[in-house]
């Protein structure tokens, strides 16, 4: 008798596994983790107290509708509360968006290299990933993405700024792109790093979604707000997209801790701005130092920088690790999060030594 095992969906064969940023080893020389685009600051003022208070009710289920958070977001962004949907991080919401639009035989377009969750959540749904290479300047090739649209296209991700290159698409080109995408294809503007943008020609997706029923904006509390560990993100989209997101949500997926902490974070706007400004200042300092060393890197509008090192990426990551910082190597280059000043210094020093040996 042959040994039987549970039948698993063939769609799962070949799904890449998500590689989280390597942790900083507790016992090794590595002291700083610059591999996951996390915020080096602790939760914003008042947030920890709020979360601790919420923890007193851990025997209760959370508010499934996330009422308080939804109302706060609606007010903060000037959108109807019916246009908001929350989820377990914006990755959770992105997965719901695919579940809501695409299955076997359907296609999902995204730039590549971009956020590594896109191919995973696309393939898990059974849909076909259609990655479109970035331009030589590591920017979204919107014309090529338009050309990749077929009758089977259901969803297009535009990651702005792009993870891992930090590059942006600007207002005129994005509007022209949106004007040309058929109205029955959902365009998801993934704005996980929007708070770090200082280029005034980059649009706010919320302005673009208002008169475009096929545009959805994805936001997260994980990066600028520093709540990566709590898993809460949200989408802003017209009905029926927002309604579909509520149907595909894991019931009670966003904990009360996460909901209350997110509300408290939204109410700590001044401290948020200060911290983001400090990180943007560190970004300028790091980019300035690297440029002075002779590196050419794409302009980053996010909380990380991208060194297009190609096949030397792994070597560079290893050198950083020996120096005490963990960074994130990809086949095309290395992504380094802007972190604590000392961590950024270690990275800049390692980059200088590495460059001299090239
Ligand atoms: C980090 C990141 C997210 C946010 O993920 P969460 O699930 O909200 O923690 C979403 N999109 C991109 C492009 C990211 O880099």
Image (spheres, helix red, strand yellow):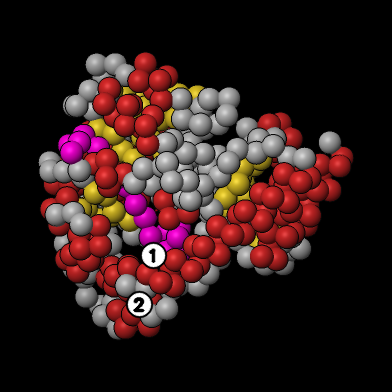
Question: Residue 275: image x %, image y %?
Answer: 50, 67
**In this rendering, position of residue 358 left or right of residue 288:** right
State which quadrant residue 2 falls in.
Answer: top left
**In this rendering, position of residue 194 left or right of residue 36:** left
- In depth, the one of 322 and 298 nearer the eye is 298
**Residue occupying image coordinates x 50% and y 72%:** 42
From the viewer's perspective, is residue 159 above or below residue 263? above
Residue 36 in sight from this viewpoint = no
- In depth, the one of 355 and 63 nearer the eye is 355
Residue 344 in sight from this viewpoint = yes
Assign the N terminus to one quadrant of the image. Answer: top left
From the viewer's perspective, is residue 47 above or below residue 111? below
Q: Which residue is mark 1?
A: 230
Q: Which residue is mark 2?
A: 51
Label 1, label 2: how far apart the Cα atoms are: 10 Å
How packed is label 1: few (under 14 Cα within 10 Å), some, or many (20 or more)? many
What secondary structure is found at the residue carrying circle 2?
Answer: helix
From the viewer's perspective, is residue 114 above or below residue 301? above
Residue closest to the far front: 200
- In depth, the one of 148 and 172 nearer the eye is 172
**Residue occupying image coordinates x 25% and y 33%:** 186
Assign the C terminus to one quadrant of the image. Answer: top right
Question: Residue 256: image x %, image y %?
Answer: 27, 71
Q: Is residue 221 magenta?
A: yes
Badges 1 and 2: C-beta atoms under 8 Å apart? yes
From the image, give the main secondary structure of the stretch colored magenta: loop
**Residue occupying image coordinates x 25% and y 37%:** 215
Q: Which residues are magenta?
A: 211-228
**Mark before the other along the chain sequence, 1 or 2:** 2
Question: Residue 33: image x %, image y %?
Answer: 62, 59
What secondary structure is found at the residue carrying circle 1?
Answer: helix
Q: Is residue 303 magenta?
A: no
């Amino acid at each position: 008798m042959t040994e039987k095992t549970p039948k698993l969906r063939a769609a799962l064969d070949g799904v890449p596994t998500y590689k989280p940023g390597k942790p900083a080893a507790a016992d090794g020389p590595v002291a700083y983790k610059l591999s996951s685009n996390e915020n080096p600051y602790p939760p914003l003022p008042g947030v920890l107290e709020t979360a601790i208070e919420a923890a007193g009710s851990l025997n209760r289920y959370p508010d499934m509708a996330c009422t308080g958070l939804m109302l706060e977001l609606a007010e903060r962004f000037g959108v109807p509360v019916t246009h908001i949907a929350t989820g377990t991080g914006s990755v959770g919401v992105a997965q719901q968006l695919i579940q809501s639009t695409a299955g076997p035989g359907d296609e999902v377009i995204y730039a590549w290299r971009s956020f590594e969750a896109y191919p995973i959540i696309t393939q898990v749904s059974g849909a076909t990933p259609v990655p479109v290479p970035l331009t030589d300047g590591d920017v979204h090739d919107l014309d090529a993405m338009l050309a990749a649209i077929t009758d089977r296209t259901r969803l297009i991700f535009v990651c702005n700024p792009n993870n891992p290159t930090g590059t942006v698409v600007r207002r005129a080109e994005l509007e022209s792109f949106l004007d040309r995408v058929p109205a029955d294809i959902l365009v998801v503007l993934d704005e996980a790093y929007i708070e770090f943008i200082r280029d005034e020609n980059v649009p706010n997706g919320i302005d673009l979604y208002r008169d475009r029923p096929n545009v959805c904006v994805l936001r997260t509390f994980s990066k600028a707000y520093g709540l990566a560990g709590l898993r809460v993100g949200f989408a802003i989209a017209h009905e029926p997209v927002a309604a579909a997101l509520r149907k595909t949500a894991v019931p009670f997926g966003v904990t009360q801790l996460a909901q209350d902490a997110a509300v408290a974070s939204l109410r700590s706007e001044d401290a948020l701005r200060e911290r983001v400004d400090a990180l943007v200042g560190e970004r300028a300092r790091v980019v300035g130092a690297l440029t002075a060393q002779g590196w050419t890197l794409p302009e980053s509008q996010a909380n990380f920088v991208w060194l297009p090192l190609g096949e030397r990426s792994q070597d560079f990551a290893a050198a950083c690790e020996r120096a005490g910082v963990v960074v994130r190597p990809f086949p095309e280059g290395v992504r380094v999060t802007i972190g604590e000043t000392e961590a950024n210094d270690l990275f800049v020093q390692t980059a200088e030594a590495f460059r001299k040996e090239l």
